[in-house]
Amino acid sequence: MKPLEPIDYAFGTAHKADRTWPDGYGVVGDYVPIGFFKQFMFPLTWKG
């Protein structure tokens, strides 16, 4: 049991997932610029 887990149970917010983590996640097959600033500006400068 993790240290803060009893608090989750006390407030009724505990959730035991029966699913496992996915093998992969994120943007697949689409263009995403490399770098934080470029990714931040991408929605503002994209011409479609």
Image (cartoon, rainbow, N blue to C red):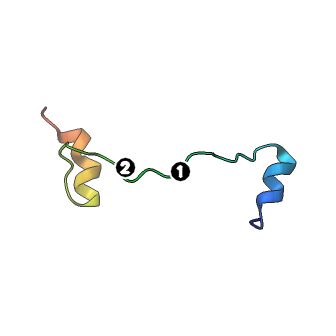
Q: Percent from the top left, x then y, of residue 34? A: 20, 58
Left or right, 13 with respect to 29, comes to: right
Label 1 belongs to which residue? Answer: 20
x%, y% of residue 17?
A: 64, 46
State left or right for residue 46 relative to residue 9.
Answer: left
Question: Which residue sits furthest top?
Answer: 48
Element at badge 2?
loop
Residue 37, image quadrant: bottom left
Residue 9 versus residue 44: which sits nearer the camera? 9
Residue in view at x 77 percent, y 62 percent: 4
N-terminal of the pair, mark 1 or mark 2, is: 1
Residue 6, percent across and down? 83, 58
Quadrant of the rendering where the C terminus is positioned: top left
Instruction: Look at the picture and state if 20 lies above or below 36.
Output: above
Going by the image, does 28 lie left or right of 6?
left
Q: Amino acid at mark 2?
A: Tyr
Mark 2, residue position:
25
Disc 1 element = loop
Quadrant of the image for the N terminus? bottom right
Q: Residues within 10 Å of mark 2 (few under 14, many from 20)?
A: few
